[in-house]
Image (tube, grey):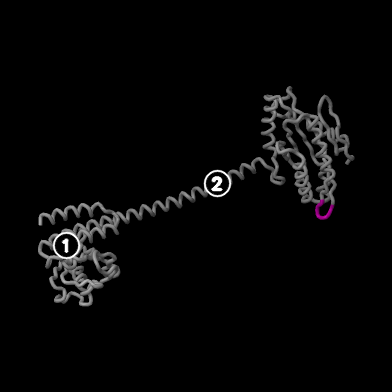
Amino acid sequence: MLHQMEVLLSLTAQLSSERNLDRLLEQIMDATTQLLDIESCYLFRLDKKRGVLFSEIEQGEGIRSIEIPLNDGVVGSVALSGELVNISSVAEDPRFNSSMVHYEGLAVHSMLCAPMKGPHGEILGVIQALNKSSGNFTEEDEMLFTALASQACVAIENAGLYKKLQEHADSLQQKVRKRTKKIREKNVELKKLNKELAAMAITDGLTGIYNRRYFNHVIVRECQLAKRHNRPTSLIIFDIDRFKEVNDSYGHQAGDYVITALTDVVKHCIRDSDILARLGGDEFVILVTVSNLEQTGKLAERLRKSIEEHGFIYASEHIPVTVSLGVAEWESQMNTDGQTLIKFADRALYQAKREGRNRVCVSGGKLRLIGNGTKT
């Protein structure tokens, strides 16, 4: 008996440390077999909603999954009465279901059934031990089995609670992952929207090129760089000749078409490093970096010719379009805010207008024309 108590204490410690319910049930079966020296063992848990005892695990030879109604057989009677049952000869016991005398080849002779009770006495299941190897089950076996059933019940309760906590933790973790994913998606969306807003703040809505706001910022930067590194930087200001007549004759939609089509022509003529912006209406500027007055003047003339020769067709009608351009180069005596450079380029543009339009005029020691198109 002393040895069995030592075994029981050892098994109890082992059961109390197991948190996985499936492994725990297997360990209870092994513990019962070892403690009572039996041939087979079953553990039935109570399903209160369905009113059945079910087993999905057994030790030794036998059935893998069975269900027993509460009012059926020895197991059912133990679940209802809450009392331990010791049967020396199952064949002579009226509570035993005769159809279960053989469990898939296992001839059942003796049986010990103990209820598993919760902390408040509620029945949670039944443990069934079959066929003691050395005769019938004794009172010592009943005591040991009752103690083992009690400890098994506590261990199952703890394992069940741990499982619920783990499932709850997994559920929370899954919710956190979903929420984190949504936050990340929203952050990506927000970054995209911020990027679009930032782009909208510096680009012209009609043409997609830079607007006056960005140009006013960038000209200061480029003039400062020109001063710091002593590098040439020039400016082209141009507008469409008699653009009001285009709107009056062909309509404002045709005017918008001319502006967007002209923008495309200009973009094909300048470098990626050149900064093209629309100041408003039909007025444009090009900030040409690392380019002196002569080089920029030649660029302006290429622009003038390309625009003059381009076929602007709207609603099957050809719209004649020309531009006048003023060119100026930043000089060391100028302020780095860019305003003087703009003033000189603007003055050259007006000179081109006065000379008959469709012209390029450059600002140097004095204003001079370098490109003469057809007067418009």
Query: Can residue 244 be found in the magenta stretch?
Result: no
In the foreground, 189 or 107: 107
Identified by mark 1, the residue type is Asp
**Image vertical order of residue 339 relative to residue 48, above or below:** above
| Numbered circle sitting on residue 23 | none
x and y percentages locating residue 223 in the rendered image = 70, 28
Q: In which quadrant will I find the N terminus?
A: bottom left
The residue segment tinted magenta is 313-317
On screen, residue 242 versus residue 179, left or right, reads right
In the foreground, 56 or 50: 56
Residue at position x 14%, y 68% in the image: 86
Identified by mark 2, the residue type is Leu
| Numbered circle sitting on residue 190 | 2
In the foreground, 80 or 216: 80
Q: How many marks?
A: 2
In the foreground, 351 or 98: 98
**Image vertical order of residue 125 relative to residue 204, above or below:** below
**Image vertical order of residue 38 relative to residue 12, above or below:** below
SS at badge 1: loop
x and y percentages locating residue 235 in the rendered image = 75, 32
On screen, residue 327 versus residue 26, left or right, reads right
Compare marks 1 and 2 and give the one earlier in the sequence. 1
x and y percentages locating residue 112 in the rendered image = 16, 67
- Which class describes the residues within 10 Å of circle 2: few (<14), some (14-19), or many (20+)? few
Residue at position x 83%, y 36% in the image: 301
Query: Can residue 315 be found in the magenta stretch?
Result: yes
Residue at position x 64%, y 41% in the image: 201
SS at badge 2: helix
Q: Quadrant of residue 344?
A: top right
Q: Answer yes or no: do the residues labelled 1 and 2 have beta carbons within 8 Å?
A: no
Residue tagged by mark 1? 37
